[in-house]
């Protein structure tokens, strides 16, 4: 039967591998690696059923020759630990014919890899006719529209402008420089090395220590490479392989299906079998018991027994689950979960409101702070210019000295007022006196990050609340044939304990941030959602009706006895 197997691994020099050698192996051919001069010969290897090279439109046509393709890859990578290629090994559904397996591979490779800009070298191996599998070798460096290799990572310089720091690549810096951004170089300040812009260093007369500007540690990764290398993309490829294989199986009229998820993700308690391999199967065919095959036989037997036991337990559980006590327990547990979700959502919304309120305060004050800093800078520069002019005047120009002195006094007074306003602004936010605009920006970024996290949490808990409400509605529908009065009374009896458990959970989870008021409001919200008042009125009406019927029945019985 069809099995799911899609193994992904990197071909890298750091692991002692070569892209040329990997291609020679999958194509069962002889190829020379120009990078190290080693010739790789796999012409004696058996089992090659089909092979092909797939190229995106921008790739050079001569790369249809796989030896030229992978030597071009080896030439583009310069370091001794470079990643050269990505390799997938996929098990092909044995139910499909060879032509159907080829069509499945072609569709999957074109849609998932070639359309993304990768070159793909593919082969099907099937040594004994019982283990068809595909080797897929992919390029990892993107191509531009002219068929030239793009960068994997690019140096990113950390530049400054008006106290703000931002990263630019070499090509981006040309435009950024015209806007006033400057690279930062290391300067000797006392015994310390401090990065700053050249214009700032020249004012203070600092000496530059070397010619290397400040940059990020790993540079900026090509966004295409970053996406190809991400765990999320690997999960997409794994799911896409299962989807493509299942579609081919369905079109071919087979009932078998494969699933990319693990047993745990699928909620299965059965143990998965292990990969037996060609060697173990060969031993079995010769009548020799293989440890791996024997272990799989035991796992299959255990799984069969587990399925039988689960079926019996399911029958017994179904009988018990439809009693009044069991249904009351289930409904109150769901109500308790709904109460917790309502409290969490209330807490999150309160936090969002607080963050938004803080942002409305911080952002205008950041603008005001930047304006004050700029004014202080301009006034200081102007005062310095006026003082220099006054010092250079001859002593006999008394009136000019007096005029410049008055200007200096005016500028000094203005500076004191601006600095005082700046100090009050910093004091308002409890910042240190030497704090700058970056402090504001960090706090604003933290608030915006918290707001984004709270939005994500709100979406998550809203979805879980909706799911639990749906589950509660289904449970209520299943309890429709039970006595509503007895069910209501049973639920009322256990409700205080369930509510107390929910409150204890919230107190433990939120600690000092736990709010009894929010819990009280959450209980009211739950009552509205579940229609508690309406349910209470219905139950009371049914109870009165039952009492009335019992009373009439007793009266008729008494009259019959009197006769």
Image (spheres, helix red, strand yellow):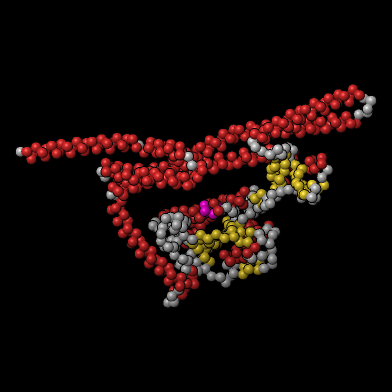
Position in image of residue 441 (x %, y %): 65, 39
Position in image of residue 252 (x %, y %): 41, 56
In this rendered view, identify the residue nearer to me: 119 or 441: 441
Query: Quarter of the image containing the N terminus?
Result: bottom left
| Residue 273 among those drawn in magenta | no
What residue is drawn where x is 92% and y is 25%? Answer: 397
**Would you place residue 454 above or below residue 393 in this image?**
below
In this rendered view, identify the residue nearer to me: 478 or 224: 478
In this rendered view, identify the residue nearer to me: 41 or 6: 6
Task: Tell whether 221 sits left or right of 107.
Answer: right
What residue is drawn where x is 62% and y is 34%? Answer: 362
Task: Tell whether 241 sits left or right of 268.
Answer: right
Identify the residue at the far right of this view.
Answer: 396
| Residue 236 among those drawn in magenta | yes
Position in image of residue 135 (x %, y %): 54, 62
One can see residue 509 in this view: yes
- Predominant secondary structure, magenta span: helix
What residue is drawn where x is 53% and y is 35%? Answer: 353
What residue is drawn where x is 31% and y is 54%? Answer: 317
Tell me the quarter of the picture where residue 181 sits.
top right
Bounds of the magenta segment = 233-237
Task: Tell whether 200 sits left or right of 245.
Answer: right
Position in image of residue 533 (x %, y %): 33, 35
């Amino acid at each position: 039967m069809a099995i799911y197997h899609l193994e992904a691994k990197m071909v890298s020099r750091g692991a002692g591998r070569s892209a040329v050698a990997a291609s020679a192996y999958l194509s069962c051919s002889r190829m020379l690696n120009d990078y190290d001069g080693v010739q790789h010969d796999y012409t004696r290897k058996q089992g090659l059923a089909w092979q092909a090279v797939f190229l995106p439109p921008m790739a050079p046509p001569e790369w249809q020759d796989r030896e030229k393709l992978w030597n071009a890859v080896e030439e583009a990578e310069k370091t001794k630990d470079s990643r050269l290629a990505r390799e997938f090994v996929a098990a092909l559904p044995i139910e499909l014919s060879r032509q159907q397996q080829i069509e499945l591979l072609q569709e999957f490779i074109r849609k998932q890899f070639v359309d993304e800009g990768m070159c793909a070298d593919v082969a099907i191996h099937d040594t004994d006719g019982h283990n068809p599998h595909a080797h897929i070798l992919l390029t990892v460096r993107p191509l531009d529209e002219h068929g030239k290799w793009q960068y994997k990572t690019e140096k990113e310089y950390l530049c400054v402008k008006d106290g703000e720091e931002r990263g630019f690549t070499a090509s981006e810096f040309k435009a950024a420089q015209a806007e006033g951004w400057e690279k930062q170089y290391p300067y000797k300040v006392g015994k310390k090395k401090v990065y700053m812009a050249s214009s700032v260093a020249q004012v203070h007369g600092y000496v530059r220590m070397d010619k290397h500007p400040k940059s990020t540690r790993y540079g900026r990764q090509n966004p295409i490479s970053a996406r190809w290398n991400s765990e999320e993309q690997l999960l997409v490829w794994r799911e896409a392989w299962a989807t493509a294989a299942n579609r081919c199986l369905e079109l071919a009229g087979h009932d078998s299906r494969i699933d990319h998820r693990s047993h745990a993700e699928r909620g299965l308690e059965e143990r998965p079998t292990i990969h037996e391999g060609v060697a173990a199967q060969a031993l079995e065919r010769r009548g020799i018991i293989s440890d791996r095959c024997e272990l799989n036989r035991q796992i299959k037997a255990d799984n069969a027994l587990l399925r039988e036991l689960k079926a019996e337990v399911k029958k017994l559980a179904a009988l018990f689950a439809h009693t009044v006590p069991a249904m009351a327990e289930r409904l109150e547990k769901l109500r308790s979960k709904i109460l917790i979700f309502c409290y969490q959502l209330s807490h999150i919304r309160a936090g969002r409101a607080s963050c938004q309120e803080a942002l409305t305060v911080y952002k205008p004050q950041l603008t005001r702070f930047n304006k004050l800093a700029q004014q202080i800078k301009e006034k200081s520069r102007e005062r310095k210019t006026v003082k220099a002019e006054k010092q250079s005047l001859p002593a006999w120009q008394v009136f000019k000295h007096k005029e410049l002195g008055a200007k200096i006094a005016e500028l000094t007074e203005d500076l004191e007022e601006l600095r005082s306003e700046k100090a009050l602004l910093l004091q308002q936010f409890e910042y240190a006196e030497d704090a700058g605009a970056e402090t504001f920006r960090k706090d604003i970024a933290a608030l915006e990050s918290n707001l984004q996290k709270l939005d994500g949490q709100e979406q998550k808990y809203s979805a879980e609340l909706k799911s639990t409400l749906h589950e509660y509605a289904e449970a209520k529908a299943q309890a429709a044939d039970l006595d509503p009065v007895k069910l209501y009374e049973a639920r009322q009896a256990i409700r205080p304990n369930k509510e107390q458990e929910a409150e204890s959970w919230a107190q433990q989870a939120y600690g000092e941030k736990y709010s009894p008021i929010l819990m009280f409001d959450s209980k009211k919200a739950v009552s509205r959602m579940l229609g508690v008042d309406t349910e209470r009125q219905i139950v009371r009406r049914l109870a009165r009706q039952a009492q009335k019927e019992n009373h009439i029945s007793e009266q008729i019985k008494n009259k019959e006895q009197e006769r």
